[in-house]
Image: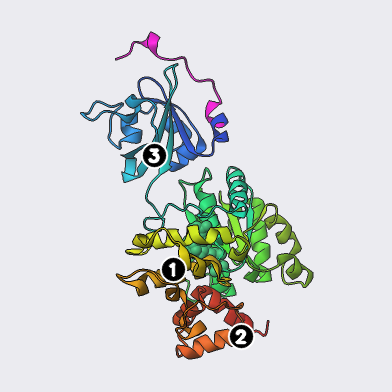
Amino acid sequence: MLSLTETPALMPPGLGEAMDLIPEAFLIFDRDHRVVAANTAAAALLSRSREALLGRGCQEILHGRPGPSCSGPERCPLEAGHTAGPGVLVEAAGGARLRLRITASPAGWTGVFLQPEGHAREAGDDISLVGHSAALRGLMDMVERVAATQATVLLLGESGVGKERVAEYLHRRSRRAGGALVVVDCSTLGESLIEAELFGYEKGAFTGADRRKTGLFEAAHGGTLFIDEVGEMPLALQSKLLRALETSRIRRVGGTGYIDVDVRVVAATHRDLAAMVGEGGFRQDLYYRLSAFPVRIPPLRERPEDILPLAEHFLRQADGGARHLPLEGAVAAALQGHDYPGNVRELKNMVTRAAILAGDGPLRPEHFAMPEADGGGAAPARRGRLDPGRIRAALAACDGHRGEAARRLGVSERTLYRYLRRLEGGG
Ligand SMILES: Nc1ncnc2c1ncn2[C@@H]1O[C@H](COP(=O)(O)OP(=O)(O)OP(=O)(O)O)[C@@H](O)[C@H]1O
């Protein structure tokens, strides 16, 4: 045990707030492994107030056991001082799995970065942005910078370019990473449903509202709300969204009081919002508010250097696909010869399908040919953009089954649904 004289001096007041400059969850422990400072991200991650963390021992905070500091048989990771590489995995209070990166300082303080591990992510996927084109590197740099702020971000890009993926990347690199990432897609919900989903409702607000429902804004409290296809949001709701963004307060449908929400909004669209403003289809004030920080995600055809790294990444994800790596020769050429109207999603579908077709044999260029494009020919045909003719042909080829038609077209079912809505609306 250390004597009082060996305990480092008290941390200066306000240090916890200053630590908010660090976007990751960060704690400082003293020699007795008690918390002397915590930033807001750490408090959010550990679901306690900053004050409630101060003075608590590592035993309680990092190892999920009652008691002041480590006395058990295991060596405390804080003893080890510096960690290299991926850090140490611990099971903290409430069963949360946390990855710790530890930086010891000579004065006796130990700094610990905390990262949540293993929730709400795709299996085996680390939500990195795969690719090494200059365009993608520039994009990642921009996202890293904006992630550290609270700014509303607008992601612009064609269908399947990775808007949702970038939103998740941004969330995970923000100080909200410990909170939820809540996704809402305006293109698949009708007007009344979007409102009920986003803002929730009180019991009796409308016929069928037989109980109170919490909205997605509330569900994203302390985290990020990703509003996909914000251009499809009806005008009446746009003003409600603007109000929520400006006041950080929402009102449930049928409710009288306001509820404070601490939510960062990331919106996305494949539409030209400025043109929509000109045509009266999108509110100008909301457009300005959302486009405070626009980020364009270039289509895959503008960054062909990313095709092979992405294809290899998807092969690694595909069952047994990794044995086809590295991609070279005719297979690599076939992949690079496509124009990918469905962008990264199309590439992913194509590669996953090819790995299945190859079975136990080697991967060949013809495995990348989609059935409706070439009827089984030797090389993948270059395909055009999604147009009504191609969509109708694909739907006809699979008896109107939308999921199957979307797969054939190399787009998501959501995207196909959107195109159909536009076609039906004559737009
Ligand atoms: N850079 C990337 N690295 C790894 N995977 C990616 C990358 N970009 C996209 N993906 C993957 O490609 C698929 C399509 O991406 P995503 O759903 O994010 O696109 P989107 O632009 O949101 O599409 P939509 O407009 O249809 O909503 C997803 O499975 C996603 O994980």
Q: Is residue 360 magenta?
A: no
Q: Quadrant of the N terminus?
A: top left
Residue flagged by tag 1: what amino acid is it?
Val
- Ligand 1 within 8 Å of disc 2? The answer is no
Rendering quarter of residue 238? bottom right
- For the view shown, which residue lies furthest in the top direction? 5
What percent of the width, then of the height, locates residue 398?
Answer: 45, 88
| Mark 1 residue's CB less than 8 Å from ligand 1 | no
Front position among marks 2 and 1: 1
Which residue is denoted by mark 2 in the rendering?
388
Residue at the far front in the pictured view: 329
Looking at the image, which residue is at 29% across and 29% down? 76
Asked if residue 182 shows in the view, the reply is no
Look at the image and give the residue range highlighted in magenta: 1-17
User: Which circle, 1 or 3, is nearer the viewer?
Assistant: 1
Three-letter code for the amino acid on which mark 2 is drawn: Pro
* Residue at 65%, 71% in the rendered image: 234
* Disc 1 to disc 3: CB gap under 8 Å: no
Which numbered tag is attached to residue 351? 1
How many callouts does the rendering have? Answer: 3
Percent across and percent down for residue 215 are 51, 61
Residue in front for this viewpoint, 320 or 110: 320
Give the residue pinned by disc 3. 86
Seen from this angle, which residue lies furthest right? 278
What residue is shown at x 72% (from left), y 72% (from top)?
Answer: 281
Circles 2 and 1, Cβ within 8 Å, touching? The answer is: no
Instruction: State the CA–CA distance, disc 3 to disc 2.
Output: 49 Å
Q: Position of residue 298 (x, y in %)?
A: 63, 61
Q: Residues within 10 Å of mark 1 (few under 14, many from 20)?
A: many
Which label belongs to residue 394?
none
Q: Are marks 3 and 2 in contact (CB under 8 Å)?
A: no
